[in-house]
Amino acid sequence: MNLTAVDWLIMAVYFAFVLGIGVVLRRYVKTSSDFFLAGRSLPAWICGLAFLSANLGAQEVIGMAASGAKYGIATSHFYWIGAIPAMVFVGVFMMPFYYGSRARSVPEYLRLRFDEKTRAVNAISFAVMTVFSSGISMYAMAKLIQIMHILDAPLGKLGVSTTSSFHLSIFISALIVLVYIFLGGLTSAIYNEVLQFFLIVGGFLPLSFLGLKNIGGWNGLKQQLPTSFTHSWQGLSSAHSNPLGVEFFGLVMGLGFVLSFGYWCTDFLVIQRAMAADSMNAARRTPLIAALPKMLFPFLVILPGMIAIALPNPPTTTTAVTGHVQEFNQAGKGLIPAKVDETTGLPQVDANGKPILDYDLAMPNMLLHYFPTGILGLGLTALLASFMSGMAGNVTAFNTVWTYDIYQSYINKHASDAHYFQMGRIATVFGIALSVAAAYAATRFNNILDFLQLVFAFVNAPLFATFLLGMFWKRTTGHGAFAGLLSGTFAAAVHQGLTLPVGAHVGIKGGWLRSLHTYPSEMAQNFWTAIWAWSVCFAVTVIVSLCTRAREEKELVGLVYSLTERVSEEHVRWYRRPAALGVAVIGLAIVLNVIFW
Amino acid sequence: MGVDIRLPIGLMFSIFGLILTVYGIRSDPAIYARSLGINLNLYWGLLLVAFGAIMLLLGVRRQRSRM
């Protein structure tokens, strides 16, 4: 791929701004609260866009385009039935306790509501997870830069071997994220996330526009794709009549309820953005404001994936087909090439002899296909920005949980504020160093990362049951929550060990205990693992809570729904009221679901 | 907090817009075959300049009213 000077100029301007924000904000960061919580001083719209952007990592841009190419518009379930209801719920119902309790992190809320051991489980598993997620994001970015040959030309000019582009990408991205978080803390991360949000919209919007224009609009796209690709709900009555391989109940309960609520309502990575808001009202509106653009993201990330698979192969548009990521092979479909076996040079095939498509290249290939030099620089910068915001979000969440919930709680309890502030900066450095190590581990031991992600899924699946009971049932006890979390994680592991998606081998995909049931797809298996984990956690928490001594009610004021005064909103205008905004957001999500039924 | 965020956003997008607009005017039309014959750099550049200018305006007004 050949980038010209104008592309490099745009990229350079972006990096200058990213670092500049850190340098300028450094002056305003004086206490640990400034560093970890942005001094709780930001307006709702900034927190809202950061809430959205922190989650907008590699999984979103590359992954959702890949799913769009693989499953079609049904991928929008991750937004319109997954994220949106959960975002409304956390804003309207849960934020009063997160923000109102003055907890500085999600694990700290668990400490206030339950006990030390429940916090410890959550804090330690979360800290490990963020480091690995950030490392995986870094690895994915370096891999992409390598595949797209972005750095090959400049490295060639310098006379350096192109194999070092992977190392250079990791080093540069780690250094940039390190500098701006080290200097400006959470404020710097949030400001950059807002910048990244606008950049991602500005860089990808022309792509959807050009793609649609090329293929003849939505109707043209419909003609090129099977009907199941352009309808999100039709065929969901049975797992065998839709591309996801999931039936209605599994989708709504597994994805819509357990997984989405578990992520958006309990993950400190996103909740931290709302905790930085300047008032309770702003904190509650943060996820609701985020939900509005979130709803429209399918048009930005899923649509290009669908267009990529719908284009003829080889593309017969008027566009010049040069400089693509991989040579178009006849085995590919649309703009998506088949995976090629590195030793033989032939396309890889599955058990049925069909070529295995490399869906992750949907978005990069679309960029290269439609964008001339100039705007191509903008699009690539947006792609890099999305990777970096995912990384930075994890790093800021990590340094806070490490400092407040691990270091201050178990290692050094009574130090000065300046000491914890300093620790936050040190944690930023070793958090990023660990992420780099994780990124390199990923290059050597791919299976270990798959395994870790599986373990994280087990740990996360039951979490929402604990928070739901903790916030809305005052009888829930610390022993109950702790026992529930452990048994929920255990149930997830057992369920996964007893089932297998169709066509998969026994091992990391499941069935390692014994194969009792076969699911029509891996997604269905994941959803049902989550449903089992949640239900077991819920039941065990209730039973153990009833057998153990409840806490005094006066200790739970501000932490539990029935014992906390409602926030009065009579003096605020209707569009600033979280409940009214929530209803509006849900209404819009329903409209979108109906349009693409 | 200190700096109104609209200032860096406005400034960055104005610069992006100007770069793309100028490049769009001066570039060889042949490169736009891939973008369906549309001079994407020029039009998208102008749009980004407009967006950047609005952000700058809002940011400056806010910063002034605070002083």
Image: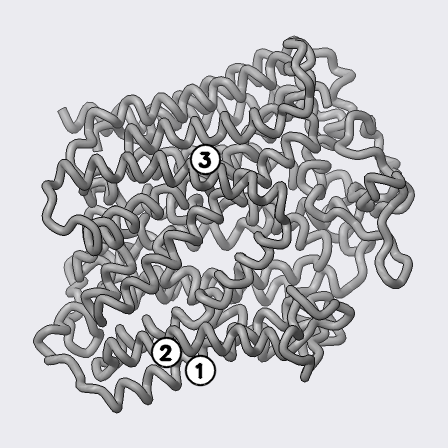
Residue linked to disc 1: A536
Circle 1 packing at 10 Å, graded few (<14), some (14-19), many (20+), is many
The amino acid type found where label 3 is placed reads Gln
Give me the residue at 55% from left, 74% from top: A529
Q: Quadrant of the C terminus of chain A?
A: bottom right
Mark 1–mark 3 contact, CB under 8 Å?
A: no
Mark 2–mark 1 contact, CB under 8 Å?
A: yes
Circle 2 sits in a helix, a strand or a loop, which is it?
helix
Q: Nearer the viewer, residue A60 or A478?
A: A478
Which mark is drawn over residue A375? none
Camera-side mark, 1 or 3: 1
Residue linked to disc 3: A196
> Are tags 2 and 1 found on a single chain?
yes
Q: Is residue A496 above or below residue A582?
A: below
Quadrant housing residue A420: top left
Q: Is residue B53 visible?
A: no
Circle 2 packing at 10 Å, graded few (<14), some (14-19), many (20+), is many
Mark 2–mark 3 contact, CB under 8 Å?
A: no
> Are tags 1 and 3 found on a single chain?
yes
The amino acid type found where label 2 is placed reads Gly
Q: Nearer the viewer, residue B9 or A59?
A: A59
Q: Quadrant of the N terminus of chain A?
A: top right
Q: Is residue A467 above or below residue A17?
A: below
Which mark is drawn over residue A484? 2
Q: Earlier in the sequence, mark 2 or mark 1?
A: 2
Residue A224 is situated, as x and y percent measured from the top left of the image, at 82, 53
Q: Earlier in the sequence, mark 1 or mark 3?
A: 3
Give me the residue at 33% from left, 82% from top: A541
Q: Is residue A565 above or below residue A128?
A: below
Circle 1 sits in a helix, a strand or a loop, which is it?
helix
Circle 3 sits in a helix, a strand or a loop, which is it?
helix
The amino acid type found where label 1 is placed reads Val
